[in-house]
Image: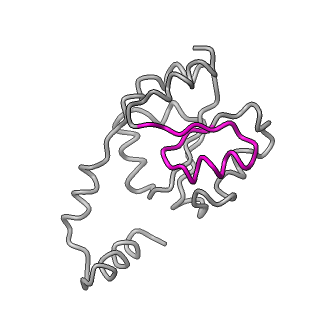
Amino acid sequence: MDETSFWTSLAATCGLERAPAEWRTVLDQSMRAMPVVRQLPSWGRHARLVLISNHRHEWLVPRLEALALTGHFSELWISSLTGAVKPDQAAYDRLLDGTDPAQTLYVDDKPANVAAARSLGVRSLLADADGRWSEEVDAWLGC
């Protein structure tokens, strides 16, 4: 679904003919970087980082670029571009293509996505709001 179709569908679900322009502004203002972004440079020196996101690239990529975060990731797999949405297995297939699941650590804030990765044999962590999960990542990477 393209972005225009998304807004049209959301508006219709809310009983509106079209989405108010303020909705996009609210969306943009609500996107915040998590405190663990400070650890990305260190993690990137120890591992190949891949971002798998159920997001719209039109919203996410500019935010990542503005925060100078894109360079820390080897790849960005965003559902609006890949067509694969977590927790469907297809969202993880490219990640695991040629990769040993035992050498992979997956982190997500949604229990269903963590469970899906675990079902594929991938060690997975549920990201808590306080960021304590980042200590487990540091330990796993030996940082």
Going by the image, does 73 lie left or right of 132? right
The foreground one among 4 and 105 is 105
Q: Residue at x 52, y 19 (%)?
A: 42
Part of the protein shown in magenta: 106-128
Q: Position of residue 17 (x, y in %)?
A: 25, 85
Q: Is residue 139 above or below residue 90?
A: above
In this rendered view, identify the residue nearer to me: 29 or 15.
15
Kindly identify the residue that appears in the image at 57 percent across and 14 percent down: 143
Residue 122 falls in image quadrant: top right
Taking the magenta stretch, the answer to whether it contains residue 43 is: no
Q: Is residue 107 magenta?
A: yes
Residue 93, percent across and down? 72, 52
Q: Is residue 56 left or right of residue 108?
A: left
Query: Which residue sits at x=77%, y=33%?
Result: 102
Where residue 119 appears, x then y in whole percent? 72, 49
Residue 20: percent from the left, percent from the top?
Answer: 20, 72
Q: Is 35 left or right of 134, judged from the image as shown?
A: left
- Establish if 55 lies above or below 11: above
Q: Is residue 104 left or right of residue 128?
A: right
Query: Furthest-top residue in view?
Result: 143
